[in-house]
Image (cartoon, rainbow, N blue to C red):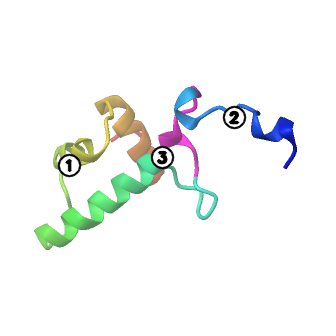
């Protein structure tokens, strides 16, 4: 390791303006937001013992884990569902 390498300043992740919640994962292409929504949906479906989960209930549980506006939640959910507005 050269002297220059020791003193090189690398930006920390928190120093950048990059939002890591919207960065797709290299394994499957899902963002953290999408993964949290899908995981929360799965857990809620198991808890309610049914397939249908009310959207507002899902939103309430998602914001317990991740800060997200209703509009952004609906946009991400719409992208996962792959159809028009909910």
**With respect to residue 75, does 40 lie above or below?**
below
Relative horizontal placement of residue 30, taking residue 52 as reference (left or right)? right
Observer-nearest of 12 and 5? 5
Residue 19 rendering spot, x and y as whole percentages: 52, 34
Front of the two marks 2 and 3: 2
In the depicted structure, whether residue 81 falls above or below residue 48: above
- Residue 10 numbered mark, or none: 2
- Mark 1 vs mark 3, foreground winner is 1
Q: Does the magenta stretch include residue 23?
A: yes
Whether the residues at callouts 2 and 1 have beta carbons within 8 Å, the answer is no
Name which of mark 1 and mark 3 comes first in the sequence. 1
- Residue at image position (21%, 67%) is 45
Residue in the picture at 76% in, 33% down: 8
Numbered range of the magenta stretch: 16-24
Which of the two labelled residues, at mark 2 and mark 3, occupies the earlier sequence position?
Answer: 2
Residue found at the far left of this picture? 48
In the drawing, does residue 70 fall left or right of residue 4?
A: left
C-alpha gap between disc 2 and disc 1: 37 Å
Give the residue at x 46% y 50%: 32
Q: Which is more toward the observer, 72 or 63?
A: 63
Q: Is mark 3 on a helix, strand or loop?
A: helix
**Residue 46, position in %: x, y?**
19, 72
User: Can you identify the residue that label 3 sits on?
Assistant: 79
| Label drawn at residue 61 | 1
Q: How many marks?
A: 3
Assign the magenta stretch its main secondary structure.
loop
Spatial CA distance of label 1 from label 3 is 19 Å
For mark 1, give the secondary structure.
helix
Q: Nearer the viewer, residue 7 or 55?
A: 7
């Amino acid at each position: 390791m050269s002297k220059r390498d020791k003193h090189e300043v690398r930006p920390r992740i928190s120093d950048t303006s990059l939002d890591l919640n919207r960065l797709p994962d290299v394994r499957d292409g899902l963002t953290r937001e999408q993964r949290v929504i899908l995981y929360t949906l799965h857990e809620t479906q198991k808890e309610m013992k049914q397939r249908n989960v009310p959207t507002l209930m899902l939103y309430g549980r998602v914001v317990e884990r991740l800060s997200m506006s209703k509009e952004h939640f609906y946009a991400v959910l719409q992208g996962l569902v792959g159809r028009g507005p909910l």
